[in-house]
Image (cartoon, helix red, strand yellow):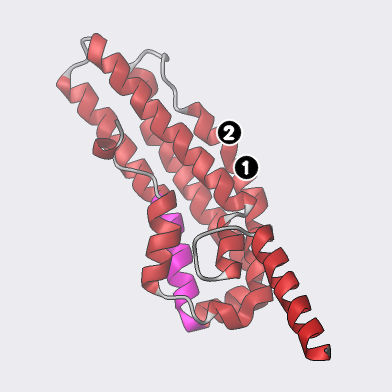
């Protein structure tokens, strides 16, 4: 009878935990990370950046932008998107590296500052390249500003997101490259100019 009660308790707890962090990954902790405000806001920022590209493409279909101007905007966006994608690749590589993983587990505050620096670099690059170029080419009709407004929120939530990994030390060792590519990089990466319709 005791074994049945314990089994039922474990089942209910695991069912409760998985309900707290829904997802398709085989790991509860990874699902929790992917459901964190950090990832949610990152995805929101990506959506805003991609919407500005859609807006530009619609405007370019009716305006007489030169081919050179369109290419300038496209190149600036692609380079900016690549910088934001480096955030995801850095997290992936760091969690796969044994020494770095140990650092993340022990010093999640310091690691969140590292990610903050990468994000701030991507933000500065975006502002100086894509935002500046699209604003100039469209005479301010498209600015790309909404993404920049979300960056402080992404940074704020980073600390809480990385603290999560301290709670799942055993699970984190089972993560692999293919899993991160499938669940972290591909679903949340900034798409290239040609992928955005």
Mark 2 neighbour class, 10 Å CA radius: few under 14, some 14 to 19, many 20 or more: few
Mark 1 neighbour class, 10 Å CA radius: few under 14, some 14 to 19, many 20 or more: few
Q: Which residue is mark 1?
A: 152
Image height check: is 83 above or below 69? Answer: below
* Quadrant of image for the N terminus: bottom right
| Residue name at image x 41 percent, y 14 percent | 141
Label 1: state its secondary structure.
helix
Q: Which residue is mark 2?
A: 149
Image height check: is 20 above or below 68? Answer: below
Whether residue 135 sits left or right of residue 103 in the image: it is left
Q: Position of residue 102 (x, y in %)?
A: 58, 81
Do callouts 2 and 1 mark residues in contact (Cβ within 8 Å)? Answer: yes
Query: Looking at this view, is 5 or 155 the one in front?
Result: 5
* Residue 127 in view of the camera: no
* Quadrant of image for the C terminus: top left
Quadrant location of residue 169?
bottom right
Q: Position of residue 34 (x, y in %)?
A: 55, 57
Q: Position of residue 144 (x, y in %)?
A: 45, 27
| Residue name at image x 74 percent, y 71 percent | 13
Whether residue 8 sits left or right of residue 44 in the image: it is right
Mark number for residue 40? none
**Residue 153 falls within the magenta-colored stretch:** no
CA–CA distance in space, label 2 to label 1: 7 Å
Majority secondary structure in the magenta region? helix
Write down the region rendered in magenta: 85-98
Quadrant location of residue 107?
bottom right
Label 2: state its secondary structure.
helix
């Amino acid at each position: 009878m005791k074994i049945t009660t314990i089994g039922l308790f474990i089942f209910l707890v695991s069912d409760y935990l998985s309900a707290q962090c829904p997802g398709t990954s085989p790991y509860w902790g990874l699902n929790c990370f992917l459901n964190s405000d950090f990832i949610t806001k990152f995805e929101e920022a990506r959506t805003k950046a991609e919407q500005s590209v859609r807006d530009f493409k619609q405007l370019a279909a009716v305006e007489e932008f030169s081919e050179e101007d369109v290419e300038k905007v496209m190149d600036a966006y692609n380079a900016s998107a690549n910088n934001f994608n480096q955030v995801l690749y850095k997290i992936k590589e760091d969690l796969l590296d044994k020494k770095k993983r140990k650092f993340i587990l022990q010093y999640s505050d310091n690691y969140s500052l590292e990610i903050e620096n990468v994000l701030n670099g991507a933000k500065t690059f975006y502002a100086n390249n894509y935002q500046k170029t699209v604003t100039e080419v469209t005479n301010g009709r498209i600015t790309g500003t909404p993404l920049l407004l979300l960056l402080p929120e992404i940074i704020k939530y980073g600390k809480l997101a990385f603290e999560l990994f301290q709670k799942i030390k055993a699970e984190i060792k089972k993560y692999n490259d293919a899993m991160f590519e499938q669940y972290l990089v591909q679903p949340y990466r900034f798409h290239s100019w040609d992928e955005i319709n």
